[in-house]
Amino acid sequence: MNDQDQSMLQSRGLKQTGPRKMVMGALRRICGAIAPYDLQKKMAKHGEKMHAVTIYRVLKALEEHGIVHRHPCDGRYSLCSIPAEKGHHGFLHCHTCGRIDEFADERLCTIEDQIARSAKFKPHEHVSEIVGTCASCTT
């Protein structure tokens, strides 16, 4: 776990537990999105053994504090790549190569809230993912 991860946990009022450090370190090594069971396998290859239930609990806590994101398209998780960015975080997901880029835009949150209000719907969270083909795959 690097200093950035430690300060992220601390700034959000989370203790720096062993499981949290291990999961965040593993996600940082992967540099992308991964399913919890695949994360468990990758951690085991690095000698980090952790029960799947613990991984799910850690991911849930980290997600609730904006440290990781659960990708709506496939349920995989990744570290937030732009934690300091204000606004609604969303993803550009390339269906061809699997690359996922994160973006943030305060306007998107406002628009989604307006849509929900007009439908008399009370949102609990916003999740946006645009699935398509990235510039590298279209050339």
Image: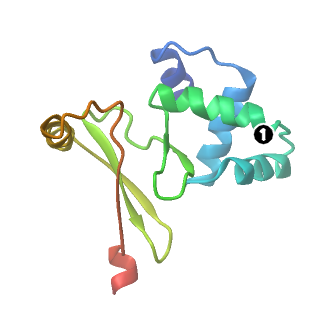
Q: Residue at x 52, y 16 (%)?
A: 10
Count of numbered marks: 1
Q: Give the x, y percent position of residue 70.
A: 50, 44
Residue type at the position of mark 1: Ala
Q: Give the x, y percent position of residue 68.
A: 51, 38
Q: Is label 1 in a helix, a strand or a loop?
A: helix
Residue 92, compared with residue 85, is above or below; it is below
Relative to 37, 8 lies left or right: left
Is residue 1 visible in the rendered structure shown here?
Answer: no
Residue 129, compared with residue 94, is above or below; it is above
Q: Quadrant of residue 119?
A: top left
Q: Residue at x 49, y 25 (%)?
A: 8
Relative to 134, 86 lies left or right: left
**Residue at the extreme front of the image, as rendered:** 120
Color encoding of the figure: rainbow
Relative to 28, 108 lies left or right: left
Q: Give the x, y percent position of residue 43.
A: 78, 46
Q: Quadrant of residue 52?
A: top right
Is residue 79 visible in the rendered structure shown here?
Answer: yes
Q: Quadrant of residue 34?
A: bottom right
Residue 20, compared with residue 24, is above or below; it is above
Q: Residue at x 16, y 34 (%)?
A: 117
Q: Residue at x 44, y 60 (%)?
A: 100
Along the viewing direction, whichever of 113 and 30 lies nearer the viewer? 113
Q: Give the x, y percent position of residue 124.
A: 35, 30
Q: Crowding near pointer 1: few (<14 within 10 Å), some, many (20+)?
A: some
**Residue identified by numbered label 1:** 52
